[in-house]
Image (cartoon, rainbow, N blue to C red):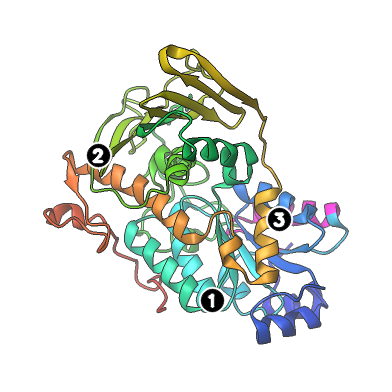
Amino acid sequence: MPPVTRREFLEGSLALTGAALWSQVAGGAPPSEKVNIAILGSGRGAGLADQFARLPECNVVAICDIDESRGQPLAQKISDQTGRRTAWVNDFRTLLDQKDVDAIAIATPDHWHAPITIRACVAGKDVYVEKPASHNIVEGRLAVKAARKHNRIVQHGTNLRGATHYQEAWDLLKKGEIGKVLMVKAINNQRRGRMEARPDEPVPSGVDYDLWLGPAAQRPFNRNRFHGGWHWHWDYGTGDMGNDGVHQVDLGRWALGLKAPNAVSCSGAKLGSRGDAQETPDTLIVTWEYDDLLYVFEQRDFTPYQMPGHRNENDNIFYGDKGFLMIDRDGYKVFHERGKPGAVVENKFNDSPRHFQNFVDCVKSRQREQLLADIEEGHYSAMLCHLGNIAYRTGRRLEFDGTSETFPKDKEANQLLGREYRKGFELAAI
């Protein structure tokens, strides 16, 4: 099945001319109509497509993937699920011109997240962008600026914000349940497989590899740098801190209203992945310094076990001067002085529809202040991950200016705040 052309998409995918007109005039879907969303990517995008397809106020009108072997089957699956035609397209840029596409959900590799967000905002589309919000700090801030200038609704994919027990726990912290919080630890503890070296090879049939590379430097095709494996290469991914750890980083930041830190330091290594083709570290200890708080991130991608006393492999611990609180997606526990047990809440969390429903609601209402994870929140959480990676790559403690979002005393570190974009794939003018 060939990808749908622009004309075919306009003529055959939808007949919601009222919604299209509203998108042009008012910048969003009318309350009486459905939000028409296109999904970019078929990895995590498959989960997004399923979630959005289940919402009564939403139509998944297109699946966009540069790999026909993944995009076309997912489009067919969603068509079968909903009973409505979902098109497959291989170039996201064609979607930006479609008047009957109200929003796009970005589940591409990290190096495309911010560039597509910016282009979509300029084109008048609302955006759901998977975590991390960006591949670097400079483009992350530009994505925020684009969303604000063009009055777009942009939700970040830190979907744990859709679990209600987190807000309950943050309320306890604000009430002083464990006293003054002086330290937070975010833990990313799990087992990742090894990536054995593989030779370069011809581009598979049905894959638009040039578009997949996009802003990144031209390189031969290699499956270690393609589906899934891109996470562990600096040109495309942000390591496991930006991939999965960003959830835990976001939670600690959300709980205490943290933004940019004063300084960052990092110790890291490849321990479980030593000798394989992975570029990013599997083991990290990052410390972000705030005025009266230390925020620590701990990553161990070589552990096939949970920590004693922890119910989930990934969680957060808040240390106060009168006790501590442990929280993960399954609930939370409070311990007071000398380890005396306090409140215990059980709340098993899966991929809750609340986060996705929240996005659709805000697209219709145009009230971005109601978003659970506005793009600026996503920018700050991604920023902490980028800062940790920069500290790892430079090997030193770095002072950071949160106003200019630069390192005032380190020119080398400043070079890692952005990237060089391949010709033809530069960032769109805001």
Q: Which residue is mark 3?
A: 357
The verdict on residue 63 being magenta is yes
Residue 97, percent across and down? 61, 80
Asked which quadrant contains residue 391, the reply is top left
**Residue 265 drawn above or below residue 153:** above
The verdict on residue 406 being magenta is no
* Quadrant, the N terminus: bottom right
Residue 218, percent across and down? 36, 59
Q: CA distance from mark 2 to mark 3?
A: 37 Å
SS assignment at label 1:
loop
The residue lying at 71 percent from left, 48 percent from top is 353
**Residue 39 drawn above or below residue 157:** below
Q: Earlier in the sequence, mark 2 or mark 3?
A: 3
**Residue 320 drawn above or below residue 133:** above
Q: CA distance from mark 2 to mark 1?
A: 36 Å
Q: Which residue is mark 2?
A: 392
Read off the magenta span: 62-81
Q: Which residue is mark 1?
A: 151
Q: Would you say the magenta stretch is mainly helix, strand or loop? A: helix
- Residue 430 lies left or right of residue 355; in this view the side is left
**Residue 28 drawn above or below residue 272:** below
Q: Earlier in the sequence, mark 2 or mark 1?
A: 1
Question: Could one spot residue 199 in this view of the protein?
Answer: no
- Residue 317 lies left or right of residue 274; in this view the side is right
Residue 84, percent across and down? 85, 63
SS assignment at label 3:
helix
**For mark 3, does the 10 Å Cα neighbourhood hold few (<14), some (14 to 19), or many (20 or more) residues?**
some
**For mark 2, does the 10 Å Cα neighbourhood hold few (<14), some (14 to 19), or many (20 or more) residues?**
many
Q: What amino acid does circle 1 point to?
A: Asn
Residue 359, percent across and down? 65, 60
Q: What amino acid does circle 3 point to?
A: Gln
Q: What amino acid does circle 2 point to?
A: Tyr
